[in-house]
Image: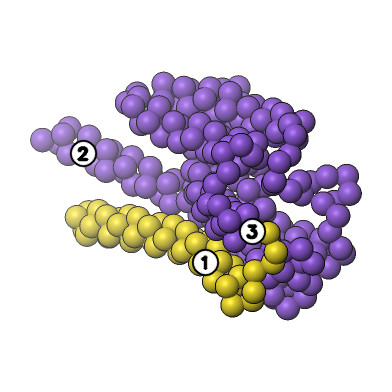
Amino acid sequence: MYSKGLVPLAVASVVSITAAMALIFFYAPLDADQGFVQKIFYVHVPMAIVALGGFVAGGIFGIRHLRSGDASWDLRSYVAIHMSIILGLGVLVTGAIWAKASWGHWWVWDEPVLVSFLVVFLLYCVYYPLRFAIEDPDRQARYSSVFAIAAGAFVPLNFVAVRMAESFTHPRVLSQTGGSMPGEMRLTFLVTLVAMTLLFVTLWKFELTAKHASLQLKKLRQRRADREAVTA
Amino acid sequence: MPALPLDEAGQYVAAAYVVFLALILIYVAIMAAKIARIDREISQLAEDDE
């Protein structure tokens, strides 16, 4: 059901990640201001964009679940949020490493971009206790979808609010001037963004397939137990 | 701040990419363990049915 197209996706992910790494280290020029440290940008920023996109996708799947009542949309929403949390953790850690290298501090509390991402990340950390505190599967799916929609709507609002805020130290990448990146850097960034998106979709489908297999197994076991109870 | 010398900058860049790689590898390892468990349980079910 969910495994359709998983193999070509996995191959595309491996090829695009390999291409992205080659571009990052052998094609993209060194940044005139930051030098070699700026290479962290190519893993940190695409991870952040894909993580935020995954949170929004989780909200959209939540809407589809509430509209259709089909539990598979809730599963899609849950896995998208789960994957985004993992990438979000990567964003925070790689961001801290980059901050230490270029600003001399692991974290800067008065920088809106950093703090807002942390707020979004912590908001989604609440999703797990909320989801698994509810035992009834239908209620669990419904409440989780409502959370996914509300939090998913907060992500773009938060993004806009941060862009309107005054920037202190963190650079703006998605601007009308393309972050003033030269062509080679922009191409490398776009290839890395595509690679990260493909990786996200591949792992998302991979986890969906595993979760679906686990659910089917549980159903089979239940059916078998019921059959044994009848015959006994 | 001025740009860091290459040897020092290299450590930070390597650390960032290792974090990314480690996250993916840990995730895949956990998923592989889960799939192996599902596979074992399916085999057990099939054995019991025979």
Q: Between residues A225 and A56, which one lies in front from this camera angle?
A: A56
Residue A209's spot in the image, x, y percent? 48, 51
At mark 3, the secondary structure is helix
Element type at mark 2: helix
| Quarter occupied by residue A60 | top right
Q: Earlier in the sequence, mark 2 or mark 3?
A: 3
CA gap, disc 1 and disc 2: 50 Å
Q: Residue at x 69, y 46 (%)?
A: A170
Query: What residue is pinned by disc 3?
Result: A102
Is any part of residue A57 visible from this angle?
A: no
Q: Residue at x 65, y 36 (%)?
A: A112
Rendered shade, chain B: yellow
In the image, A66 versus A52, the foreground residue is: A52
Q: Which mark is residue B15?
A: 1
Label 1 environment density (alpha carbons within 10 Å; few <14, some 14–19, many ≥20): some
Q: CA distance from mark 2 to mark 3?
A: 61 Å
Q: Residue at x 73, y 39 (%)?
A: A167
Q: What residue is disc 2 on?
A: A225
The structure residue drawn at horizontal position 46% and vertical position 22%, both measured from the top left corner, is A143
* Labels 1, 2: one chain: no
Look at chain A in the picture and name its colour.
purple
- The type of residue carrying mark 1 is Ala
Instruction: Say above or below: A169 vs A147.
Output: below
Q: For the residue marked with disc 3, what is the amino acid? A: Ser
The answer to whether residue A92 of the structure is visible from this angle is yes
Which residue reaches farthest left?
A232
Q: Is residue A141 left or right of residue A42?
A: left
Return the x and y of residue A219 as percentages of the image width and height.
Answer: 33, 40
